Image (cartoon, grey):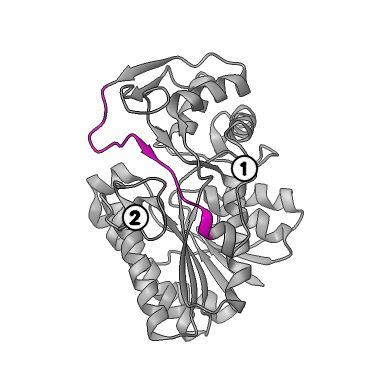
Amino acid sequence: MRVMVTGGAGYIGSHTAVELISAGHEVHIVDNFINSSPVSIERVEKIVGQTILLSEVDMCDHDTFAKVFEQYPFDAVIHFAGLKAVGESVAQPHLYYQNNLVSTLNLIDLMAKHNVRNMVFSSSATVYGSPSELPINENASLHATNPYGQTKLMIEQILNDMSVSDNDWRITALRYFNPIGAHKSGSIGEDPKGIPNNLLPYVSQVAAGRRERVSVFGNDYDTVDGTGVRDYIHVTDLAQAHVKSVEELPSRYTSFEAYNVGTGTGTSVIEIIDAMKSASGKEIPYVIEPRRPGDIASCYADVSKINSLLGWSAQLTVQDACRDSWNWQSQNPNGYVS
């Protein structure tokens, strides 16, 4: 298949490009590099041993984006592109609604015009908000609690409506939990701009001496050690879930499906710190801070649907992810600018 990967220079997109090419598919990346680096594509090319088609395009610019569809045929799209920082979305919600929704609407319009009706959408467990039951399954109520999550939820609704209006669409929304880790080569990984929003990159930077200590927000939750528990999935496993999903689209009977992508088990903040300490051989100082408003004790996925219907399950552990993250961090102490 020839697959357009929007946001393919980003963290998950770049790893998915590797897995797609390894599975024999042709990849065409579309990215504007707002929160990614073109160096990641150069690294992917070295890993897979071939040149990757790239269009540097702002998907919110309909006319410019249209030229990509006019020049190249596609069998499917994997749609990662979008702004993704929860805190920034709360501070500047208009940017998130403008960018994430307009770019997706332009993509849908151009896909329809060029008869490309297979899509895998990069959704998020944020669409569940604060879960009332654990583990979370796909039938849980949807109620995002921040503008970033709202854009994911709105896009899912738009895509579902498109599939109802035209049964030729085949759309999968992957609701994934907490991606961590890096490619085993250490060549590509998570490269946050400024202070990391996610736990493992922050812990890695503390291990590397870039930051003084980890702040652990709350140690009095009803969990194994009192700290928050989340479902952490290795980015390579997550990338392979995208490959499985896009390969399944042409033969699927239903028009729209949503799948959780996680491990089905939770890991606490302290357990993550200990795993990175073991992987790096470095001391990782941390300090206990008060709970943050809105944080919950535990969040992890019911992955039985994707296990049974797609035959996918996570193969890599948190320890694997910490090993690979440290490999990436130690080889690239300042990310792609190294």
Q: CA distance from mark 2 to mark 1?
A: 28 Å
Q: Residue at x 48, y 53 (%)?
A: 33
- Estimate the x, y position of residue 41 in percent, counting from the top left: 62, 52
> Is residue 299 one of those drawn in magenta?
yes
Answer with left or right where residue 154 lies relative to residue 110.
left
Q: Is residue 17 above or below residue 212?
A: below
- Camera-nearest label, 2 or 1: 2
Which residue is disc 2 drawn over?
Answer: 127
Answer with left or right where residue 226 lies relative to residue 68.
left
* Label 2 crowd (10 A; few <14 / some 14-19 / many >=20): many
At label 2, the amino acid type is: Val
* Label 1 crowd (10 A; few <14 / some 14-19 / many >=20): many
Which residue is disc 1 drawn over?
Answer: 188
Q: Residue at x 72, y 61 (%)?
A: 23
Badge 1 marks a residue whose secondary structure is loop
Residue nearer the viewer, 3 or 313: 313
At label 1, the amino acid type is: Ile
- One can see residue 6 in this view: yes
- Estimate the x, y position of residue 152 in percent, counting from the top left: 36, 59
**Quarter of the image that includes the C terminus:** top right
Magenta residues?
A: 290-305
> Is residue 45 one of those drawn in magenta?
no
Residue nearer the viewer, 267 or 32: 267
- Estimate the x, y position of residue 182 in percent, counting from the top left: 60, 40
Q: Is residue 294 above or below residue 156?
A: above
